[in-house]
Image (cartoon, rainbow, N blue to C red):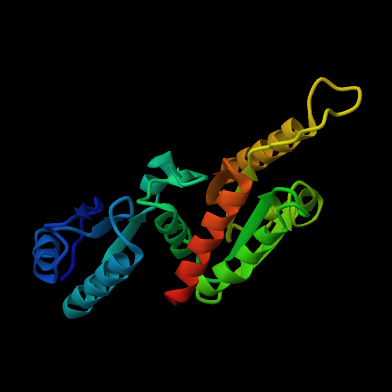
Amino acid sequence: MRRLRRIKILATLGPVSSDSAMIRRLFEAGADVFRINMSHTSHDKMRELVKTIRNVESSYGRPIGILVDLQGPKLRLGSFTDGAVQVFGPLAANLEDALKQFLDGITPGGYLAVMAYLDRIGDAEAAQIRPALARASRGRSVTFGWGPRFLHSTGQYHKGGPQVGSFLQITGAVQADLAVPGQAYTFGTLQAAQAAGDRQALAQRGRPLLHLHLTDRAAGLSRLLGAAVSLAEEV
């Protein structure tokens, strides 16, 4: 089957147009490219659709284009609270769902960077999230750094390196704060500003980012670690 026209027809696949028979009908009607909207499609469903399209392509002996639209999830952002954890990122049912969506979005050969803008002594157990997420992500590379000090080392790679990283930032409410000598702000305010600047820099470069804020550090860490371990145990 040859098509000599220069204009290409794009068909968006949806709930009623994603089975093999419908894709064949759309192709025979003139569709050249099939669009998969990731706003409403899981990664497993996407792989299923790609396989179906490739089977149709093989039976007709003609290349078929596939467009995976990633813009939807970036725009479908919001916030919700799960226990003592505020979640800022793609909409999800709960903390486990938010983490799973984020882990599923790590690109092949990519890595996850956990950036903890917390107290490395008082909140030391936060480091336990790295091995749990490494297992939950099925062997993806996972790094862990205490903010803001990692900004001058791995933080440079996060922004200047190849577009293969996904970034989980963890911040927490400050209970006891200290003033910065000679300044009108506190160390807690300074750390929050550095975390916000890091988020902005990553967003400007199109890096995937999930921000978790602990409204109560002890309770929030317990909830977060529990969610990570739960996902790891499912693997």
Q: Splitting the image into 4 quarters, where does residue 172 fall?
A: top right
| Left or right of 193, for residue 100 | left
Residue sitting farthest toward the top? 184
The number of callouts visible is: 0
Instruction: Examine the rendered structure and indicate whether residue 13 appears above or below residue 108.
Output: above
Q: Which residue lies at the image location 86% right of the left edge and 29% below the top edge?
A: 180
- How far across and how far down the image is residue 134, in percent? 57, 71
Q: Which residue lies at the image location 81% right of the left edge and 20% below the top edge?
A: 184
Whether residue 11 can be seen here: yes
- How far across and how far down the image is residue 158, in percent? 68, 54
Q: Which residue lies at the image location 56% right of the left edge and 50% below the top edge?
A: 220
- How far across and how far down the image is residue 224, in percent? 54, 56
| Left or right of 26, for residue 94 | right
- How far across and how far down the image is residue 163, in percent? 59, 57
| Left or right of 1, for residue 188 | right
Give whichever of 47, 66 is nearer the camera: 47
Q: Quadrant of the C terminus?
A: bottom left
